Image: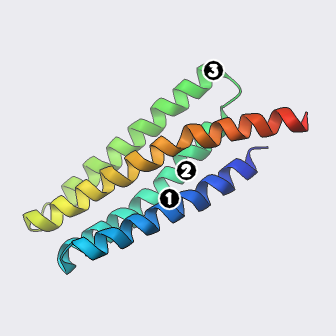
Amino acid sequence: DGVNALVRYALSALLIVGVGAGVLWLVLEESSWRGALVAALVAYPVQVIAFWLLLRARHEASRFFTWWGVGIGIRVAVVVAVGVLSSGLDAPQRAALLLSLVGFFFVMLLMEPVFLKADRNDARTTA
């Protein structure tokens, strides 16, 4: 239950991250682009895991909001950890890394309601 929504979300998120990384490759210098690529590689699995947690709790409002908050907390912790771990990079590289990470999280977070709603509609039609 919810596997289809997770697979669709994961594939769509992978496409979005791939397109985003491709666009950043076109507009950033090489050293900054590497930071954006690292951001994509970090953001994607974290985001898919956070969405999976939401799917598991989607039928109970109190659990849903708890896991939504946990997911937000995980994303914030990842951004803080990456910020601390990237302190040795020069300013443009670090900015590209952190801004890309936050940007990828933001876009994928905006996608979640679409896939949660689709999952809810799928559950209704199969019941």
Q: Quadrant of residue 24?
A: bottom left
Mark 1 highlights which residue? 45
Residues at circles 2 and 1 in contact by the CB criterion of under 8 Å: yes
Q: Quadrant of the C terminus?
A: top right
Please tell me whether residue 3 is drawn above or below residue 64 in the rendered image: below
Q: Residues within 10 Å of mark 2 (few under 14, many from 20)?
A: some
Where residue 87 sits: x, y (%)? 13, 60
The amino acid type, in three-letter code, at marker 2 is Ile
Q: Nearer the viewer, residue 58 or 100?
A: 100
Along the horizontal axis of the image, is 28 left or right of 119?
Answer: left
Residue located at (24% from left, 54% from top) = 99
Badge 1: few (under 14), some or many (20 or more) residues near its Cα, within 10 Å? Answer: some
Q: Residue furthest bottom?
A: 30
Is 66 rendered above or below residue 26?
Answer: above
Q: In the current view of this chain or complex, which residue is farthest to the left? A: 91
Disc 2 designates what residue? 49
Q: Quadrant of residue 117?
A: top right
Q: Which secondary structure lies at badge 1?
A: helix
The residue carrying mark 3 is: 61
- Callout 3: SS: helix
Separation of marks 3 and 2 at Cα, in angstroms: 19 Å
Disc tally is 3
Label located before the other in sequence (1 or 3): 1
Apparent side of residue 93 relative to residue 7 in the rendered image (left or right) = left
Whether residue 51 is visible, yes or no, is yes
Query: In this orientation, which residue lies closer to the viewer: 91 or 77?
Result: 91
Element type where label 2 sits in the image: helix
Q: In the picture provided, is 82 more to the left or to the right than 46?
A: left
